[in-house]
Amino acid sequence: DAGITQSPRHKVTETGTPVTLRCHQTENHRYMYWYRQDPGHGLRLIHYSYGVKDTDKGEVSDGYSVSRSKTEDFLLTLESATSSQTSVYFCAISESDANEQFFGPGTRLTVL
Amino acid sequence: AQTVTQSQPEMSVQEAETVTLSCTYDTSESNYYLFWYKQPPSRQMILVIRQEAYKQQNATENRFSVNFQKAAKSFSLKISDSQLGDTAMYFCASDGGSQGNLIFGKGTKLSVKP
């Protein structure tokens, strides 16, 4: 299995609080992605990174920011969580932008 | 925009039988990759099989095989000798995203019954 971990695995927070999710990889892959999974939508891209300090927005980036200061870590931040951000968040990694992606175990976030 | 469509929200199959999950996609690329991912109740996304569009031969991985029809933009997954552990959500995906991301279908929930 690809070495990808996500923390925390579960989190319950209140509307308006900041939240940071962490993705850590041991594969030294260049590309990292954050997706969210919601019923009836499959997985949708939030942000992605193509190298250290190189990030860009995805399909559903509003309300989220990311940072990548090291190859192995990709952080997703909700500056002020809203109930619409209740979801399961997946991190994925890939060697290139044309290869298969390997996923972390996911984080279930509930915003009350 | 690139799209991936899975028209079967739910399916069921008896243990040891064969089942086929459907997927169609839309892309303007000439070379691309297609994938099937499995998501069991544990929530982990597991790569089942991948197909490179320029390869005419259908991909096979043990009991899993695909029927890739490039002209029809169809990419179905066949599971032979279904096992209880195959019970999961199955997602079809293409690498057609402009940011190198995967575009996912909405999934098919497969139940394997004893």
Image (cartoon, coloured by chain):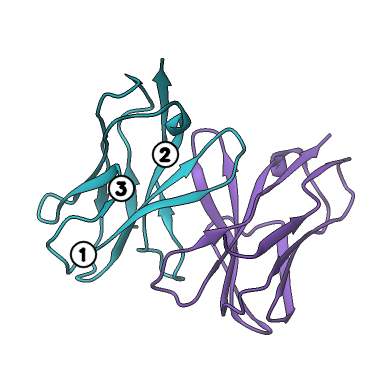
Q: Between disc 2 and disc 1, whose residue precedes?
A: 1
Q: Which of pointers 2 and 3 indicates the residue nearer the eye?
A: 3
Q: Which residue is mark 3?
A: B62
Q: Which chain is cyan?
A: B
Q: CA distance from mark 2 to mark 3?
A: 17 Å
User: Relative to residue B73, is residue B78 depicted above or below?
Assistant: above
Residue at position x 34%, y 29% in the image: B82
Residue at position x 86%, y 42% in the image: A15
Residue at position x 17%, y 55% in the image: B58
The secondary structure type at the circle numbered 2 is strand
Position in image of residue B105 (x %, y %): 39, 44
Residue B106 visible to the viewer: no
Q: Which of pointers 1 and 3 indicates the residue nearer the eye?
A: 3
- The amino acid marked with disc number 1 is Ala
Mark count: 3
Q: Which chain is purple?
A: A
Residue at position x 66%, y 63% in the image: A4
CB atoms of marks 1 and 3 within 8 Å = no
Looking at the picture, do discs 2 and 3 lie on one chain?
A: yes
Residue at the extreme top of the image, as rendered: B114
Q: Which residue is mark 2?
A: B90
Looking at the picture, do discs 2 and 1 lie on one chain?
A: yes
Left or right for B78, reference B40: left
- The amino acid marked with disc number 3 is Asn
- The amino acid marked with disc number 2 is Tyr
Residue B33 visible to the viewer: yes
Q: Which residue is mark 1?
A: B53
The secondary structure type at the circle numbered 1 is loop
Position in image of residue B80 (x %, y %): 26, 34
